[in-house]
Structures are given as structure tokens and as C-alpha cells.
Amino acid sequence: MSNPTAQALFEAARAAMANSYSPYSNFPVGAAILTPDGAIHSGCNVENAAYPQSWCAETTALAHMVAAGDRRVVAVAVIAEKADRVTPCGGCRQKLMEFGTADTKIHLCDQTGVVETVTLGALLPMAFDLDTP
Ligand code: THU
């Protein structure tokens, strides 16, 4: 891979996916976030017997980022064990936009690395923003 940062994000997302708690969907997901100062925060999906109480890998990664004191998302990597390419769900797109921008990179990964890179703006056009007139 030519982009070492994307590779590091991919590896962090894959490592987090290995800890996924997803006995109900059997669909492990991992995510990793890059901040402006180069920190990486990762997370996995965490499910619950009361299904709606489950949450996504991106949400876990964001929570780790915020708890560490970081507030800006430069890039994200997402990987699912049973898909060649997975994109963040609608709710996670909005959560990522809270701390990212339309230019935030979203690296979509398979088991070997990044297969496609899109922007958060492309995934969430006309995003809700309190500053939007
Ligand atoms: N999931 C994520 O963790 N991230 C996504 O962007 C899509 C879906 C999880 C939620 C649930 O635990 C499982 O994947 C199946 O939907």
C-alpha cells in the first residue's frame, strides 16, 4: 500500500474487529479514526440481547477519541469480517460528521487493506448542521 497512514488505520481497524462482540449478527466490524495530530482511536461493534441496544464500531472508535480528549476526525478506516467492503451506517455518518468535515476520508477495507477511499461528504450529502441557514 502506498499510503502508510491508511495502512496503519486499516491495521488498527482490523485489530479492533478481532475483539468485536457480535454474537447476534455474527457480523464483526472494526473501525479506526485518525486525528490531526496523528493519534489513532479504534473500536468494534458491541451487540446486546436487546438488539436495539447494540452499537457500531465507528461509534466505539468515536467514543474512545472523545474520551481521550480529541475532537477532530481526519480519516477513518472501516472493515467487516464478512464483507469485501463496508460503509458506515447512516447514523454513524452523522456521528462522524459531528467531528469531521465533508473532506474527511473514509477508507473502505477488505481483509487485505484499503480497497476504496471516499469522503464523508459523498456519504452524507447535505448533512444536518446547526450552522446551515
Ligand atoms: N455495524 C457496524 O459496526 N458499523 C457499520 O457501519 C455497519 C453495521 C454493525 C452493527 C451490527 O453489530 C452489525 O454490524 C450488523 O449490522
Image (tube, rainbow, N blue to C red):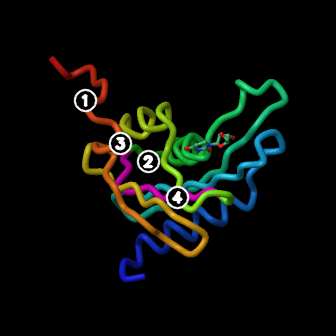
- Under circle 3, the secondary element is helix
Q: Which residues are magenta?
A: 72-80
The image's mark for residue 70 is: 2
CB within 8 Å, label 4 to label 1: no
- Residue depicted at x 30% and y 29%: 127
The three-letter amino acid code for the residue at tag 1 is Met
Taking the spot 36% from the left edge, 37% from the top edge, the residue there is 97
Q: Which of the 4 quarters of the picture holds residue 106?
A: bottom left
Rendering coords of residue 107 (x, y %) = 42, 60
**Which amino acid does the dot numbered 4 rest on?**
Arg
- For residue 37, above or below residue 67: below
Query: Does the segment drawn in magenta span residue 79?
Result: yes
Query: Dot 1 lies on which element?
Result: loop
Residue 74 inside the magenta-drawn segment? yes
Residue under pointer 1: 126
Residue in the image at 49% along x and 31% along y: 91
Q: Which residue was labeled with disc 4?
A: 85
Residue at 44 percent of width and 47 percent of height: 70
Residue 119: percent from left, percent from top: 31, 51
State the separation of the CA atoms marked 3 and 4: 14 Å
Disc 3 designates what residue?
A: 123
Label 1 or label 2, whichever comes before in sequence order: 2
Q: Is mark 3 within 8 Å of ligand 1?
A: no
Q: Could you tell me the amino acid type at mark 3? A: Leu
Q: Earlier in the sequence, mark 3 or mark 4?
A: 4
**Marks 2/4: CA–CA distance:** 27 Å
Distance between mark 1 and mark 2 Cα atoms: 25 Å
